[in-house]
Image: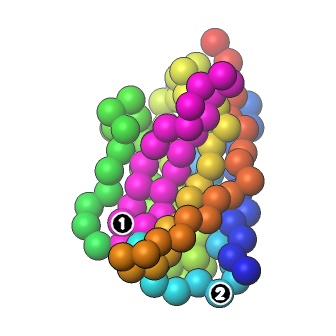
């Protein structure tokens, strides 16, 4: 069983920073990618950043230059450093782990709330 546990969300003023963490545990193999998504109330979940095992990272246009995704392979943990936060960044943030090759399985964290006051 694979589980993803998120932490680091909270309330922050515009222009502030937060760092989200997502720790994976369980039987993990053949990691294809780790990424972050977010979902605002009443909105669809959208991609924020993704880090493929092979290839360059990708960011949503709305967060480029402000957010940075990274990971610690030894700890099976992925991070999202969020700087210059804006009110429109307010959402529940979810990490995702994709495993497999050709046939993939996605695992999701429980979500962590990020609120940027206006």
Q: Position of residue 105 (x, y in %)?
A: 54, 70
* Residue 6 position (above or below residue 89): below
Residue at left offset 50%, top offset 68%: 98
How much space separates mark 2 and mark 1, taking CA atoms?
19 Å
Residue at left offset 32%, top offset 57%: 57
Give the quarter of the figure containing the N terminus. bottom right
* Residue 86 position (above or below residue 39): above
Residue tagged 1: 52
Q: Position of residue 35 (x, y in %)?
A: 48, 57
Q: Residues within 10 Å of mark 1 (few under 14, many from 20)?
A: some
- 58 falls in the magenta region: no
Query: Of label 2 and label 1, which has the lower sequence position?
Result: 2
Residue at left offset 64%, top offset 59%: 108
The one of 83 and 64 positioned closer to us in this rendering: 64
**What segment carries the magenta color?**
33-53
The reply to whether callout 2 and callout 1 are in contact (CB within 8 Å) is no
Give the side of residue 97 with respect to residue 118, left or right: left
Q: Overall secondary structure of the magenta stretch?
A: strand
Q: Position of residue 3 (x, y in %)?
A: 72, 71
Give the side of residue 67 with respect to residue 21, left or right: left
Residue tagged 2: 27
């Amino acid at each position: 069983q694979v589980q993803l546990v998120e932490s680091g969300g909270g309330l922050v003023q515009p222009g502030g920073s937060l760092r989200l963490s997502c720790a994976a545990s369980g039987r993990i193999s053949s990691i294809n990618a780790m990424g972050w998504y977010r979902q605002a109330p009443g909105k669809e979940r959208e991609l924020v950043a993704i880090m493929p095992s092979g290839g360059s990272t990708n960011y949503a246009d709305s967060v480029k230059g402000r957010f940075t995704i990274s990971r610690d392979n030894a700890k099976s943990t992925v991070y999202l450093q969020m700087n210059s936060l804006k009110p429109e960044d307010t959402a529940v943030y979810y990490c995702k782990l994709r495993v497999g090759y050709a046939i993939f399985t996605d695992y999701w964290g429980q979500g962590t709330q990020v609120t940027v006051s206006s």
